[in-house]
Amino acid sequence: MANPEDIEFRKLGLRDYAQLYRMIEQGTIICPKPDVWNNFYKQFVKRANPDRDLLPRILSGWHSTPNEEKNAVFIRQIHAAGEFYNSLNMKEYTWQKEIFDYFANLQGRQSELVVIWKKATVNIVVSNLVQRFRLSGTETISWFVAEGELVQFDENFDRLEQSQMRHRMLHKLYPSQTATVLIERRENFPEPHLDGNYCQFGGCSGIGDNVRPTADVRLKSDIYDCVEKAFVMPNPQIEFTLEFTEPIQRKEMALIFDPPIKYSLSSNHFTLDTDAVGGTGLWYADCKLVEIIMPKHSQAVEYTPATTENFQRPAMMKKNLFFWIFVLLVFGTFLKNSTDLFGLRSTSENSNEVQRETTKKIKVEPVKLPLILPNLILMDPLKKLID
C-alpha cells in the first residue's frame, strides 16, 4: 500500500463537488487533517448526528484508527449532511457547493487532506513494429508505428482474459482490447507533459466498429535506443506498463475506479472519462518498459532495408541447413568405405612383405648325396668288341 500524503486542496486540481466526492468514495482522499475535520463536523454534520456516532477520528483516535475506517466515517458524514439538508428542502446543488467551497476557501496547510494516490494500471504488448522517418528542420527523426494489445493481471499476477479498463471515445465508453501504438523519443517534443517516460492515451483511430484508441509512447533516448536495437531482430514484442493517476491528468479528464475498491496500490477496474467537446479524451500515464520479448532461437541480424527476399531468409536458411547435413552424411559414408578398402590393401601388402623377409632369412645349403653310378647295361655285341 502507498504511504498517505498531506496535500493542499488546491493542488488536487478539483473542479467541483462531483469530482471531490468521487475521490473520497474511491479512497484517494482519506479524510481532512484533524483541525479541518473537526471544523467540518461542527459546520455540516453535528446537527445531523444527534447520536454522535460520526465523530471525526481525531485526538487519541487519529493514530490508532486505520485509514479505511477514517475514510468510511468521512463518507458517512457527507451522506448524513446531505440527508439533513434534503430534509430542509435545500437544493442538492446548493449544499454540495457549500461543502466544496468550504475546502476550496481554506488556505495553505489549513486546507490539507490526507491522500493516497491510487494507480490504475494496464500493460500494453507491442508487436509488428514499422519504423518511419520524418524531417524536423534539418534533422531526420525516426519513430515507430505498431499494434498493441491491452493486458491486465489479477492479484496473483495471472493474466486476465480481457482488460477491465474502459475509456470514453466518441461519447461512448469502450472496453477496448487493442490500440494503435506510436513510439517516439521524448526529446523530440519541446514541452513534454511529464518528466520521465510517459504515454498519451486516448483519441480515436479507425472507422465503424474498428475504432480504437491510440497509445503515444514517448521514451527517453536510452530506452528508445533499446527499441531500435530490438527492431532489427525478427518479430520482437515489447511490453510496457501504463500507470494512470489523477493529479497528472488535464482539467477535463477524469480517472474513476469503478467498483468498491479495497485499499491497494492499484486496480484493474477503472474508467478514463471526460466531458470534453467531441466526447473523446486524452489521458496521461507514466510508462515503464517491462521487457523486450524475442522469439526462441532468434539471433541478431544485420539491418537491411525490408524486401521480400529478406522476409524469406529464415526459410532459405532452413533449406540450406538440410542440404549441408545431407552432404556431410554422404561424405562421411564415402570416407568410411574408403578407409576400410585402404585397410584391407595395407594388410595384404604387409603379409607379402613378411613372406619376403622370411624367405631372405632362410639359408638354403646344397645337400651332399653319395655319387652312385648306375650300372650300365651294354649290349652284348658291344661288350664283346670292347673286350
Image: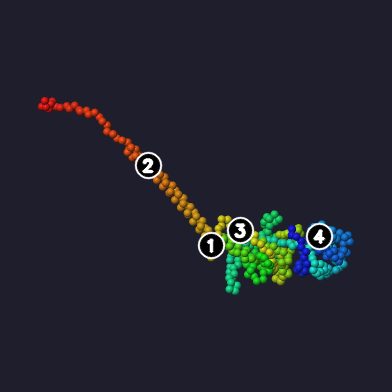
Tell me if residue 83 comes above or below residue 338 in the rendering. below
Labels 3 and 2: the sequence-earlier one: 3
Q: Secondary structure at mark 1?
A: loop
Q: CA distance from mark 3 to mark 1?
A: 19 Å
**Number of dots carrying numbers:** 4
Name the spot of residue 99 as percent of width and height, x first.
82, 67
Labels 1 and 4: the sequence-earlier one: 4
In the rendered view of the protein, which quadrant contains the C terminus? top left
What number is the disc on residue 350? 2
Label 3 Cα crowd, 10 Å radius (few <14 / some 14-19 / many 20+):
some
Residue at 50% x, 58% y is 316
Q: CA distance from mark 1 to mark 4?
A: 61 Å
What number is the disc on residue 331? none
What number is the disc on residue 293? 3
Tell me if residue 267 comes above or below residue 90 in the rendering. above
The amino acid pointed to by label 3 is Ile
Q: Identify the image's colour scheme: rainbow, by chain, secondary structure or one colour.
A: rainbow
Labels 3 and 4: the sequence-earlier one: 4
Q: Residue at label 4?
A: 70
Marks 3 and 2: CB-CB under 8 Å? no
Name the spot of residue 53 as percent of width and height, x first.
86, 59
Residue at 55% x, 58% y is 299
Q: Secondary structure at mark 4?
A: helix
Q: Secondary structure at mark 3?
A: strand
Labels 2 and 4: the sequence-earlier one: 4
Q: Residue at label 1?
A: 302
Q: CA distance from mark 1 to mark 2?
A: 58 Å
Label 1 Cα crowd, 10 Å radius (few <14 / some 14-19 / many 20+):
few
Residue at 85% x, 64% y is 38
In front here: 335 or 358? 358
